[in-house]
Amino acid sequence: MSYYNITINAKQVSLNFSASDPEKNSGTDGVQIASLAEAEIRNLLREKYTPYKITNLRLADAYQLTNLDYRTNKAVRLATCARWLEFALPPLGDDKRYKLVKTSSCHVRLCPVCQWRRSLNTFRNLAQVYDRLNQEYKHIFLTLTLPNVSAAELSAELSRYSDGFVKMLRRKPFADIVKGYTRALEITYNPGRKNFHPHLHAILSVPRSYGKKVYISQEKFLQEWEDITGWVPSEHKNVHLQVNVKAIKSVDGKSIAELAKYSVKPGDYIRPTLAETAEIIEELDPAVDNRRFLSYGGVAKRAKRELFQEKNLEDIEADTIGPEWEEWERKVYEWHFSSESYREITV
Ligand SMILES: [Zn+2]
């Protein structure tokens, strides 16, 4: 459909950003709702898309205040994100869920709308991957940390985590015992100290015999992590790095949620003032741009490939409904900048 190929110039976007209507329209007033699916969609728009879209536009404004070369490009991409949402609704009496058919995603790493959607998709995908792997493997939940770093050090530090993790798994005894993994990078920001705390969570698949003859101690994990990262406790007042290791019988929703969490919580960088937000993202964005926050290896990578084949796991939600949705009624909602709400449009 033509409305996905839209172009907006930066001037128009910035005008749209600053427009705000004190009389906000909830988008549902006086509208006859015909079905449960439609009521659910309106609820989704009100509870999720609308607040995320509002913060997405604050972020777009903040990008314009940064000195990043690509600030306008990102601001425009953010502004177009989730401007349209097209849903397919099951016929009345059919208890299937509605399906989001099309939307415009900006793929800006820090976009609150994209982060939320990516997190939902990751959760759903990992649930399927580990539903399969739980039958054959035991698992270890691992968290690796290093001390907080300044903005200037953040990018190199994130590489240190992802490279160090892979390096560790290539060493013995890890290489013999760990059959696969999913790992996620996460960053928290400390506004008081103005520094960043990256860390890495991973689920490691190990043989079912793990814990009897085969075992890797917490000390071994710590020792290797310190060795790989070059951390010498005696040079740091005998401070050891934090390594958390937990054997789990089967991977449950709680462990998956840890990996499917936002890479960086929007509340950490979308601050009360645009100036503060701009200051943080000017440092944060170059470090997270084009970086792989979630990655799979070994049996987890294979399971993911077999389950999802060519699907882009971070894109539009994986199909959970059969092809019948193609015949369903469509509803399209458009974001109104002036009233800060979604409204149904007829197509
Ligand atoms: Zn987005």
Image (spheres, rainbow, N blue to C red):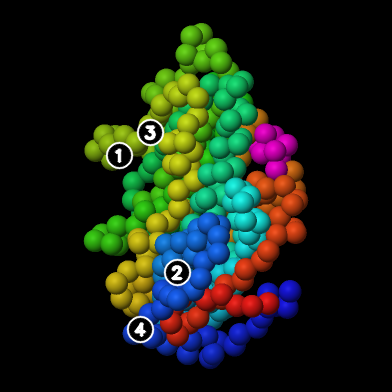
Q: Which secondary structure type mostly characterizes the magenta part of the structure?
A: helix
- Compared with 289, 243 (above or below) is above
From the Cβ of disc 1, is ligand 1 less than 8 Å away? no
| Residue appearing at x 62%, y 56% in the figure | 92
| Residue appearing at x 42%, y 20% in the figure | 217
Residue designated by label 4: 23
Between marks 1 and 4 in the image, the one whose residue lies nearer the viewer:
4
The boundaries of the magenta stretch are 301-308
Q: Which callout, 1 or 4, points at the residue further toward the start of the chain?
A: 4
- Compared with 121, 40 (above or below) is below
| Residue appearing at x 34%, y 37% in the figure | 241
Image position, residue 179 (x, y; %): 61, 26
Between marks 2 and 1 in the image, the one whose residue lies nearer the viewer:
2
Residue 80 visible in the shown view: no
Q: Which mark is residue 235?
A: 1
What distance separates the C-alpha of mark 3 from that of mark 4?
51 Å
